[in-house]
């Protein structure tokens, strides 16, 4: 089992939010996927469910820094972060 912090974009703060939402390992996040992980964070910590969190999760699951995500994908994720 790998620590969440081994994934790109996942620092101490986001790892704590993921753990609070019931996602405790990198493998659990990868199996769940970024969209479902964001829903879980939104449910448990709505004030922490922001665009940056959504982008960070998407990058982490894809193995890249969120800045490297395609611009169109970033725009769609930013819109989806605030329904």
Image: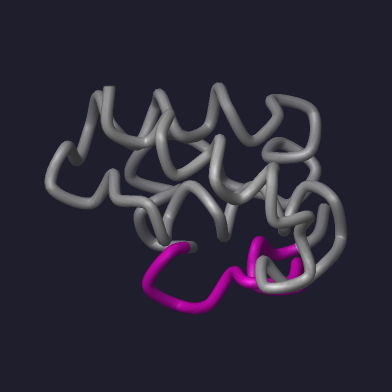
In the rendered picture of this protein, how many numbered marks are placed on residues? 0
Which residue appears at 48% of the width and 63% of the height? 15
Q: Is residue 66 left or right of residue 43?
A: right
Q: Is residue 31 left or right of residue 81?
A: right
Which residue appears at 69% of the width and 56% of the height? 71
When asked about the image quadrant of residue 33, the answer is: top right
- Closer to the camera, 61 or 72? 72
Q: Looking at this rendering, what residue extends furthest in the front direction?
A: 72
Residue 63 x, y percent position in the rendering = 86, 60
Q: Is residue 45 left or right of residue 17?
A: left
Q: Is residue 25 above or below residue 7?
A: above
Q: Is residue 54 above or below residue 52?
A: above
Residue 39 x, y percent position in the rendering = 41, 24
Tell me which colouring the rendered structure shows.
one colour
Asked whether residue 30 is drawn in magenta, I would say no
Residue 8 x, y percent position in the rendering = 73, 71
Q: Which residues are magenta?
A: 3-14
Which residue appears at 58% of the width and 27% of the height? 35
When asked about the image quadrant of residue 67, the answer is: bottom right
Which residue appears at 69% of the width and 45% of the height? 72
Q: Is residue 58 above or below residue 10?
A: above
Q: Is residue 76 left or right of residue 33?
A: left
- Closer to the camera, 20 or 42? 42
Question: Which corner quadrant holds the C terminus?
Answer: top left
Q: Looking at this rendering, what residue extends furthest in the bottom direction?
A: 12
When asked about the image quadrant of residue 79, the answer is: top left
């Amino acid at each position: 089992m790998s620590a969440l912090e081994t994934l790109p974009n996942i620092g101490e703060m986001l790892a704590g939010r993921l753990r609070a939402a019931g996602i405790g390992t990198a493998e659990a996040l990868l199996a769940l996927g970024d969209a479902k992980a964001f829903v879980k964070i939104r449910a448990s910590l709505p004030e922490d469910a922001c665009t940056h969190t959504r982008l960070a999760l998407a990058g982490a699951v894809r193995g890249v820094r969120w800045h490297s995500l395609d611009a169109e994908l970033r725009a769609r994720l930013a819109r989806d972060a605030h329904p």
